Amino acid sequence: MPALFKNLTIGARLALGFALVIVFIAALIIPLVITEFSATIKQAQQRELRGLFESAQAEIAAEGRLAEALATAVSRIPDIEQAMAEQDRDRISAMTLPVFAPMRDDYGARQFQFHLPPATSFFRAHKPEKFGDDLSGFRKTVLATNNQSEGVRGLERGVAGLGMRGIAPIRYQGEHQGSVEFGMSFGQPFFDKFKAGYGVDIGLYLETDAGGFEAFGSTLDQPGTLDAEQLRTAQRDTTIWEHMLGETPAVTYAHTVADFSGNPVGVLAVSMDRSEYVERQAAARNKVISVMAVAIAIAALIGFLITRSITRPLRRTVQAMDDISKGDGDLTQRLDESGRDEIADLSAAFNRFAGKMRDSIHEVANSTGQLSASAEELSQITADTNEGVQKQRQETEMVASAMNEMTSTVQDIAQNASGAADAAQNADEEAKDGQRVVNETINHVAALADEIEEAGTIIGNLETASEKISTVVDVIREIAEQTNLLALNAAIEAARAGEHGRGFAVVAEEVRSLASKTQASTQEIREMVESIQGGSKQAVGAMQSSQEHARKTADQAREAGQSLVTITRAIETITDMNHQIASAAEEQGQVAEEINRNVTNINEAASQTAEGGQQTSTASHELARLASQLQALVNQFKT
């Protein structure tokens, strides 16, 4: 969109702006005004419809008042009161039948009947042959009158259908005897009469058992004007809708109608020709459009005049600028700056611009010569500077090369120091591991010495026990020798006894044999005990020697552990010193690198300075050439 406006002249932009504003105002105002007129006309239409509907309700109520008045008048006739008290049907018939015909013909009475409490038909003037039927199931008006002994009126369905009822109580000597009822004409004649009096269509629609609606009475000749859905909506709330009756536009006002008990009995609809309102609305719309058309034409004319008053001075200004740029550069011409608007300000600004340009051209012409001389001098200075920069660049390159070598050496030192620190760290860790192993060895040797000492004690106890066993074996051996002697003596005595001592001789021989075996066993035990005693003495000696060696080994291990502690501390000191050397070497390397970078930057700056000097020299020559061209251009202006 901005690109589109750039391609339009200011006059076209102003014209387009005025046109858009006018169209916007028209598009905003016309619908609002037409909508307001339409709303006002519709409100007037609805007020008229509401008034007609209220008039219809008033006419229906008037029928009820007439019916109640007739019933009240009949109920006050003394003969009627007495006949009802005596329930004399013939007498009532004789009094009412002559007057019912003129009431029916002149006042629209359709029913004229009497009831006994609570709601039993006693006599029907409009149908004398029918009486005695119970009406309490559907005649609430009759029940109300006989229960309350008061007159009532209202719409109600009866045997003959829906009608306007007026009922009055009948009393005789202060006692309630029954009621009298008049049912007024509330059929098609009522609706025809209303249409004739008010000039609108009217209809009452009752709901059927099938859920639809049927016309109780209506002046709407065209079927389908009011559908069941619209009437069902009107049962819930007042409904107003616009439609067509043939070629005529119409509007219908519909609302529910209640009976005496307050129950809805149907929908009363009033339809009115709205042609006059349609014509008013169309006339108002045409007037608004006409007024807006005139306003648009006037606004367009004003916009054209304003646009022309703006574009003409602008064209003169453009022409003057073209004369300066394309012509002979005349800076002496001036525009008319009379007036107090922006165009006058623009002309005054152009005049000031031309004067300022004239003065500037004079100053530029004077300065151009000086600029040419200064450019030549600058070129010579630049050449000298360029030569000095080249020398500085060579020396800087030598310094940069030396710094690179020093940086490399410092980095090698830092790496070697770091490696030594790492090796010392590893040695420290190995020494600490050795110290830990020596400590464990000391602990194990000490434990071994304790165990050897305990084993020596046990072996000593074993030697003592073996000596005791040797003593016991000696006793057993002596007992065995004595037993052997006793057995020998017993054998001798048995031999002397002959046959009587033979059994005893056998026993003695067994005892002697056992004693001999005991002697042999005790001898073996003695030899074994002596062997154990000899081994125990040797074990005790070996244990004592091992215990002494274990103590010496523990002492030597402690001395080795102490030496490892000293070595570990020395290695830690070496490690710290190596770390410090590596850190210092790294810092020195960083400083050397920083110096190297600075020297490199200086070298690059010197190179850039040399290049800049060369460019400055070239620019100086170009500046001198441009100064000559500028002088030629300035000479083109007329000042």
Image: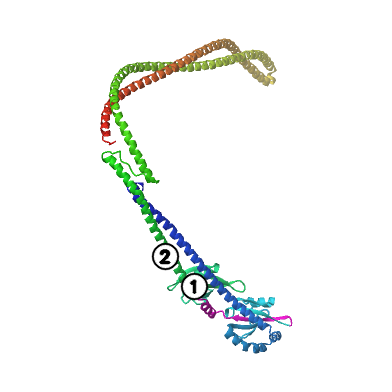
Q: Residue at x 43, y 64 (%)?
A: 287
Q: Amino acid at mark 1?
A: Met
Residue 81 vs residue 538, the one in the foreground: 81
Does residue 60 appear left or right of residue 604 in this picture? right
Determine whether the residue tagged by mark 1 lies in a helix, strand or loop. strand
From what the image shows, is residue 593 above or below residue 8? above
Residue 35 vs residue 586, the one in the foreground: 35
Q: Earlier in the sequence, mark 2 or mark 1?
A: 1
Does residue 291 appear left or right of residue 181 in this picture? left
Distance, label 2 to label 1, CA atoms, is: 24 Å
Magenta region, residue range = 173-200
Does residue 364 appear left or right of residue 28 in this picture? left
- Residue 76 lies, in percent from the top left, at 69, 83
Query: Which residue corresponds to mark 1?
Result: 272
Q: Label 1 neighbourhood size at 10 Å, few (<14), some (14-19), many (20+)?
A: many
Instruction: Please check the rendered image and state whether residue 69 is part of the magenta-colored stretch, yes or no.
Output: no
- Residue 179 lies, in percent from the top left, at 67, 81
Does residue 503 appear left or right of residue 323 in this picture? right
**Are the residues at dot 2 and dot 1 in contact (C-beta closer than 8 Å)?**
no
Residue closest to the far right: 173
Q: Amino acid at mark 2?
A: Asn
Residue 286's disc number: 2
Q: Residue at x 58, y 85 (%)?
A: 106
**Can the viewer see residue 55 in this picture?**
yes
